[in-house]
Image (cartoon, rainbow, N blue to C red):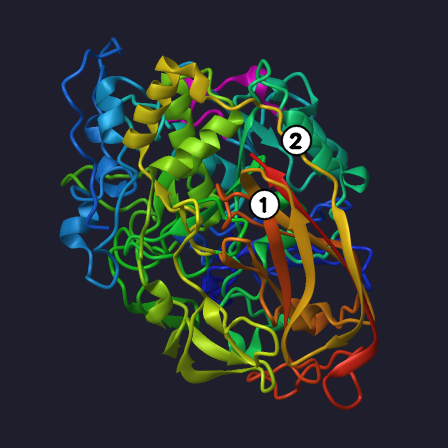
Amino acid sequence: MKCNSAYIFEIIQFTFYVRIRISTNFKEKREEMHCKTYWVIYLKRNFKYLLLPVAAASLVACGGGGTSQDSPVSTCIEAGEYACKSGETEPLYSLQWVLNYAKSYFSINAEADAFGGGIDLNVEPVHRLGYKGQGVKVLVVDEGVDIGNEDLKPNIDRSMSWNFRTMTDDPTPLQIASAGAHGTNVAGIIGAAQNGKGVMGISPLVKIGGALWLGTDNMNENHVEALGGASWSQKADIINASYGGDLGSATYSIESNMDLAALRAMRGLRNGKGIVYVKSAGNSFDSDNFGYDIRCGDLYGFYDCINPSNDVSTLEPTAIVTAALNAKGQASSYSSAGSVVWVTGMGGEGGNLGKYGEISSGTISRGSRSKTLTHDGPNVYSTDVRGCDAGYSFKDAFTTFLKGKSELRPGIKDNENCDYSSMNGTSAAAPTISGVVALMLSANPDLTWRDVRDILRLSARKVDMGYEKRTRNDVTASLKLPYNSLFDLTSNSFTVKTGSKEYVFDNSTQVPVEFGWQMNAAGDYFSNWYGFGVPDAYKAVEIALDYKKDPTKSKASLQAVPTFSQLKIVSGFNYQSVMKIAEFQSKSSTVDAFQVRLTGENICLGNFGVVVESPAGTKSYLKMPLDHFATDDLHTFKNFGLSSYAFYGENSQGTWKIYSVASNPSFFPDKNDGNPQFCSAAPATGTFASNAKLWVEARVIPQ
């Protein structure tokens, strides 16, 4: 979604979502729309938030030297006019840096602070082999898909579509200015047709279905239908979910959450191979919205104080949780970070300046208001809801392209009918991964959902190495200290010293909050910012074909999920230091995920983080030591779940250590309004809360 032209500038903060807080632990259930349009969409009952970072035209937007390699000589499996050709056949392809970085418009025309040092998904070699998503069906669960768009119409499958508002198989959204185009953008990133028009999707021969679900009645029940609970959604091979809910402390229990049950059931669909579920991580890294009590205060910009794992669906291995990369080869300024991130796709930045988003610094204005931006950059180009009176392309947009007036070819308008636009956020990053998965399944349709996530990991490239040591200077914030600065748990502030995971030990009072890339004992590199990295589509297809030659490499779709083990009841809790709160003895298995579940009474959830150490010595932050829960005075919670993939592939046998990393609950540093927050369960004096009680559970989910 976007905000319409009557609304302005705060939206440029790259954290545009519709959120619905839901948890019995909250004092009230609130609808939130971080867009300051004063326009509220009533999202029925318990659904959480919509990731709507979006196109530059919206005023909202949430949002490397690499390039596509040549493929080896091979027999082309495709026939027809576009056989084994890539996007050079499409007029707007030069804007699609996600598909070809080195030859994009931006490689020549963009400012250095907007573009340079990044990578693409390396899809062109796959296209030249003839793999373009043929035979694969992708369902976009969102706010609808415009099935009449000229670049989507050839690939639409109405039998895999549903509109929960009109109860028909036409998911086309309402024609509303600056709104309704989110799902249409998502669909185009995945599967815009190769037809000599507009843009081209990553998998241009894929079949696209759309579910107009967001903003409709009975969203909880309807969500289950959209996730494979109905005959039309069961036809999907891939489901793309560019939405979520990261504000709550909902119970992590399959017995009490229909979504979790649907995700588990999804593993048995697609003829027993399991539907592949790709999900956005969130756009919350820089959330600091005082109007809705989302506050990071003095911590703003150093780390993600809203954990993506607060959305319990991200805790399920079924979900391929996707972060976002910008055109500089770094995490997009908004991209949520956490130990549940699996891979990183392409999200870009705001794309608000210049003709196409090629300008990094400048002032945007509308009416009597203006805002100056620095270090902005391009976002992801795609399809839009048709017409200049609807969607993200409209006459009052910022860029020349979104106004319908730009010309890549002299005398020919690029977007005269406003059928194309651009989009950012992890909402854009997720469909870039869905598109790559479609290429993989086109090459080998027998891959299980577990094979797919493994191949994404195996093909992933590490990016932004050493990022924890650099200082931040991007479109959202400019900081003087590096990300691995030590956080003082007594003063709730950063020091000038830096540190590593070795600072996390019993009784430590200063810890880093970002470890950067770590290699675990299995030889896998993992980062809370990037997961296992950015997939290389060509390498992924190569591996998929290798699995086809040797089916013994495949993993069964069904995965055993053991129950949680009760470890300890902690009576009394110590703040302002690190404390080992439990140990978990595990038998031998190969780790997929390590999970912790917590229940607390009279303990400040927002004032303690969680670090887990494996028997091999790998450490992972599952939760930060001071996060947005501190502003809610949340001190009673039940079955609060956390998870990490940092230990993937390690042998689980031995002693796992679980640490609390507890900050000072007596105040939350707040540079903006001068009114520090207090947790009412904090000890009156000293650091020890004698009446606090914490139940700690854990489990290893094996591969």
Residue 659 lies in the magenta stretch = no
Q: Where is residue 636 in the image (x, y as percent from the top left)?
A: 81, 65
Q: Position of residue 596 (x, y in %)?
A: 67, 53
Q: Position of residue 701 (x, y in %)?
A: 62, 40
**The one of 630 and 515 positioned closer to us in this rendering:** 515
Q: Name the residue under label 1.
A: 653
Quadrant of the snapshot with the C terminus: top right
The magenta segment is: 146-166
**The one of 82 and 137 positioned closer to us in this rendering:** 137
| Residue 652 vertical position relative to residue 248 in the rendered view, above or below | above
Q: How many marks?
A: 2
What secondary structure do most residues of the magenta stretch adopt? loop
Q: Mark 2 points at which residue?
A: 560
Residue 155 lies in the magenta stretch = yes
Q: Which of marks 2 and 1 is nearer the N terminus?
A: 2
**The one of 118 and 621 positioned closer to us in this rendering:** 621
The CA distance from mark 2 to mark 1 is 17 Å
Picture quadrant of residue 213:
top right
SS label for mark 2: loop
Picture quadrant of residue 630:
bottom right
Q: Which amino acid does label 1 sit on?
A: Gln
Q: Position of residue 77 (x, y in %)?
A: 26, 11
Q: Which amino acid does label 2 sit on?
A: Ala
SS label for mark 1: loop
Residue 393 horizontal side relative to residue 147, left or right: left
Residue 607 horizontal side relative to residue 283, left or right: right
Report whether residue 228 is seen.
yes
Q: Residue furthest right?
A: 691
Residue 75 horizontal side relative to residue 660, left or right: left
| Residue 687 vertical position relative to residue 295 in the rendered view, above or below | below
